[in-house]
Image (spheres, helix red, strand yellow):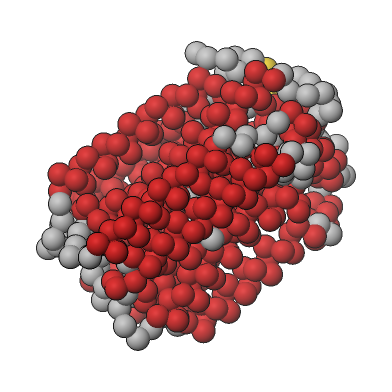
Amino acid sequence: MGEGVNTVATGSTVESPMPAGRLRKLQTLGIFCGVVAGAWLGGAEAPIKMVNPDVSPITVSLIMVLGVFLARWSVPALVRGTSSVRYDVSQAPHLVVWAVLAGCMWAAANTLTIYAIRNVGLSIAFPLWNANSLLGIFWGFLLFNELHHAGWKRWVGVLGGAAAMFAGATLLAFASSSQAPPGKGMLGVIAALGAGVLWGTMYIPYRKAYLTGMNPLSFLTFFTVGELVTMIALAVGYKGATPLWQELMSARSMLFWLMLGGFVWVIGDLFQQYAAKYVGISRGIPLSNTNQLWGLLWGTLVFHELQGGNRIVHSQVIGGSVLMGLGALAIALSSASQREHSSWREAAEREGQRYGVEDGYVRAGMEGREFEGGRKRRTLIDCILIAGTTAVFIVLAAVARLPRMDMHLSWAAALAAAMLVLLASCGITLWRTTGFR
Amino acid sequence: MAKDETGSVESASLFRIIATDIHFWIPLLVFVAGLVLLHELR
């Protein structure tokens, strides 16, 4: 077991700086989490491609959120146990409200992305809603002291990196503009931009929670309540209960793929949360937005999206991908200094004082260490949650059908294997460094 | 933040503090705007 897992933080103030070695280790970990988040968030769009376009976007979003809900209760139960969640809530109960609000925003944004994909295609919609990272940098700077005292080199690294990623994303959008269905382009663009604003602002509750010391796994369990309630309200309100039920029943052979998409998304989102926690939203969110590169890999290699494109299209794809990669690298090399981190601690102290959270808990959370009494045993409830979720997926897989599509299955297997390798290596590092704190 | 004898936070106090936190209103307003946009796109 690695550093930090057995160490109990009992500090009583947030003023004293974190040891430089520990800070460096957490920053590297946060960057790694951001990269893995990109892979899994990008991969989550693949199962949606396998769904019949006759199913309405609201229903697609609801089914995905059902998968997300199951994942967001079973994964924390598996990793740390629900007792740890209860303990976190007792330390910072106000964060339940923030988590539910963030979940409501996620559900609305996710529904908008489905309208966007339907109207302008994945390749154009992706870069538009990924502009959320620019909004994340803005909120991080304005509200949470991120990039304060960072020095011009880090500013150039983060802003230049985000700008390069945005330029790369735009190139990729141009490359695939011929894929867009005609007619409803503007609606799709508005939907994608709306999703970007919702997700970019959703990072305010994220950062609020992690500055105060909450564990991402605990935050997510309440986040998903907001998601599910919002999606059910949207679906029932827009379609009516009976038509919705009939559509769910008629789409039962696709339920597995959509819920799988939701499950994969949760894994990506979990790593995004750890990235937001350890490197802040100004760096963590742009890094996880490399999901567009993964979306492109799935689209071109598995679903033959850009087949038949001319040399200009291929140049745009290569140029856009290189720009995105360079942007992510610039951000990864601009991790927070001790001085900037002291500004984060000031923001954390402000939050702790406002909501009456113990200093030691806040400090332990920032340092990725266990606070006294935080480690709990798993209970019977955890076993029921894990077994129940597994059973649901097995039943849905049994009635699922692989749609007739022109897919390259060996590429799909290779990309899935790469994602699993990233998941295992980052998960082990996260466990050894913080014990999933 | 006010806590009762068992150390638990009083709900009324909790919601008052959240309601006076400007950070809360920014995401809430964006969420409402998102719902309006969804309604228009429907």
Write the residue at 69% across / 70% down. B29
Image mark count: 0
Against A78, is A51 above or below? below
Residue A200 screen position, x and y as percent: 59, 58
Give the quarter of the image for residue A317.
bottom left
Residue A286 visible (yes or no): yes
Residue A223 screen position, x and y as percent: 56, 52
Against A331, is A131 above or below? below
Write the residue at 44% across / 45% down. A325
Residue A347 screen position, x and y as percent: 79, 42
Write the residue at 40% across / 80% down. A185
* Residue situated in front as seen by the camera: A77 or A128: A128
* Residue situated in front as seen by the camera: A177 or A350: A177
As drawn, is B24 to the left or to the right of A96?
right
Write the residue at 22% across / 65% down. A309
Against A54, is A389 above or below? above
* Residue situated in front as seen by the camera: A296 or A280: A296
As drawn, is A243 to the left or to the right of A161?
left
Residue A278 visible (yes or no): no
As drawn, is A320 to the left or to the right of A339?
left
The quarter of the picture where the C terminus of chain A appears is top right
Residue A143 screen position, x and y as percent: 76, 52
Against A269, is A358 above or below? above
